Image (cartoon, helix red, strand yellow):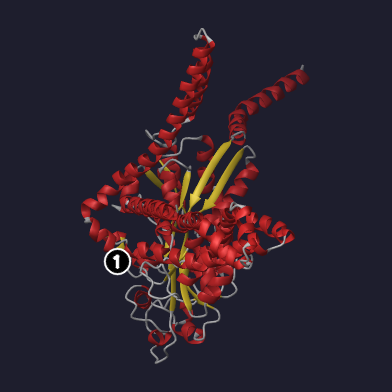
Amino acid sequence: MLRRLKTALALGVLLLLSTVSCPGAEKQRKVKDISGQVSVSGAFALFPLAVEWKEAFEAAHPGVRIDVSAGGAGKGMTDILNGMTDFAMLSRELHEEEEQRGAIAFTVGRDAVIPVISAANPFREELLRRGITADDARKIWITREFRTWGDLLGTRDRTPIHPYTRSDACGAAQTFAAWFDSKQDQLGGTAVFGDPGIASAVKDDRLGIGFNNLAYAFDAATHAIQDGLLAFPIDLDADGALAPDEYFYDTKEGLTAASEQDLFPSPPARKLYLVSKGVPTEPAAKAFLRYILREGQDLNEPNGYVRITDDIARDGLFILRHPGKASARRRDRTGTIIGIVLGLAALLLLIPLGERRKKNLAGKRIYRQRISEGIMFALTAASLLVLIGILVLLVVKSLPILQQQSLLDVLTGTEWMPSQGKFGFAPFIGGTILVTLGALVLAVPVSLFTAIFLTEYARSSVRRLVYPALDILAALPSVIYGVWGVLFLVPKWGYSLQSGSLVLAVMILPLLISLLVEIFSSISKELREASLALGATTWQTTRKVVLRKSIPGIFASVVLALSKCVGETIAVMMICGSVASIPGKLSDGFYTLPALIGNNYGEMASIPLYESAIMFAALLLAVIVLLFNVLSRIILYRIQKNMA
């Protein structure tokens, strides 16, 4: 009896324990069973830490896939406001316009932006003893009162300072500029894309000075300053000499601790955020953000970031638990796509059904002819309507800026300061035209003589070797040419017009050569033989027969190459220097319309009239290409008329 009582008591205890643990176990099972996809884009500053969070979270939750990409804070904000991602990585405060559009920022960490110089700087010892102040930085990047290292050090040395800044809309540049009460678009100097771009440019330029996020200034493995870089210490008391307690730049941990203890000024120390449009509602996104605000903070300090306080974490979790009436961020376009596909399928089905109604063969043939004509006309009209639709949309989007400034002022203005409402496009128009002309001057003669050699002089074995190589070069993505320019041309000539022209010239050479070879090969063989039979040499035949007959084709090929140069974005953006002024010489930096759009599109949602200005840049680009094509058609018609 006693044994039965003990058994019953044990079973009761086990049952009680199971009822207590079951809810928690069930909750844990549900959390582990979450699945889905989370996308994150934005600031370079937060990217290394976000990757660590991603890997740790995916390891704990195999059903969740997280995509993290860096492209600058501005791009992240555009992505999140347009519903393209779940979170934006942001390294600055939200703008009022972004908050009005539903952006919510969750603080997830803290880091700093620091001035950097080349380790090969000839004045490194004096600079490290002196340090830099906010006033010094203003005189280097804003007023340009300090143009030489002697100006900064108070000596008569005339060695120039080469300041670098960011070309992309980013939190690092905004935070750094805020240190001396300025804005990103007021920063002078050569502009390069991304944190890695500035680090590389300063390392390669012994007279360079720039600024980097903490995560990019220090090596990820050793936590020491990157090889080739030096942290330029901030003189906190501005007394012209760096005290021992003002230097904490030897390791990432030292600078992180100084930032945590508020020994490093803010700005350029700053908070880092994950931004969502409305409070996240999808389970995977909510779980990922909850993890970052809790367990993920343990990864901050090992990776060189300051963790958030418990109060900040609780505030973020409170917002996450009380989403209110957050609206869905994404628009499901699946139904629209299915509807279009079904509509096209129905149209294809109606054609044979309509045919069955025809009682005789002649009627069917006439019906098919009309259907064919109708489809071809519809497709032709659709092509034209797409062009008209693009132009109309760009005009409508460009109207706000044209209502604030006259068209003449916009086209001839030389100042580009969106934060002050100044939108002058003359530097971008000038840079686009100059780099295009430079590329054509280099590429057209080379491609012309190469095509003549291949078609008129080269052996068949040479052609079999060269033609596939040309096809491969023509198929290479433009970013490959941009990388080649950064690695081989920029170290020699800097971010300049001559570097940009040469990169574009090399990029269009395969296209031009292939087109010209096809044009020359299409000339009748009988014409060549007749010329040679009359005693003409090969060169005379080429000059008097082949080239003369090929003039319309040569002209059309050059116009095609010109259009490609005008519209090229990534390769030029990597090497132009993004200097918003018309280059006066080949060694000057420049800025093109495509690079302007590529660099600044991400920030357009944050500053009034910015979207309109970027759309106007796109409209200008479209108009320039259209004008070139229309003029080429007119000139080509006259050439053909005179040759007839």
Q: Residue at x 62, y 49 (%)?
A: 55
Q: Residue furthest bottom?
A: 156
Image position, residue 373 (x, y; %): 46, 26
SS for dot 1: loop
Q: Residue furthest front?
A: 534
Q: Quadrant of residue 324?
A: top left
Q: Nearer the viewer, residue 95 or 31?
A: 95
Q: Residue at x 76, y 20 (%)?
A: 2
Question: Is residue 220 in view from this perspective?
Answer: no
Quadrant that contains the N terminus: top right
Name the amino acid type tagged 1: Thr
- The correct choice, above or below, for 96 with respect to 190 in the image is above
Q: How many marks?
A: 1
Q: Nearer the viewer, residue 204 or 73?
A: 204
Image position, residue 187 (x, y; %): 37, 68
The residue that disc 1 covers is 414
Q: Nearer the viewer, residue 88 or 356?
A: 356
Image position, residue 284 (x, y; %): 54, 38
Q: Residue at x 48, y 17 (%)?
A: 366
Q: Nearer the viewer, residue 287 or 117?
A: 117
Image position, residue 182 (x, y; %): 32, 67
Q: Quadrant of residue 456?
A: bottom right
Mark 1 Cα-neighbour bin, 10 Å: few <14, some 14–19, many ≥20 = some
- The correct choice, above or below, for 74 with respect to 5 in the image is below
Question: Is residue 195 in view from this perspective?
Answer: yes
Q: Left or right: where does residue 527 sit relative to residue 638? A: right
Q: Left or right: where does residue 120 sit relative to residue 326? A: right
Q: Quadrant of residue 322?
A: top left
- The correct choice, above or below, for 217 with respect to 560 in the image is below
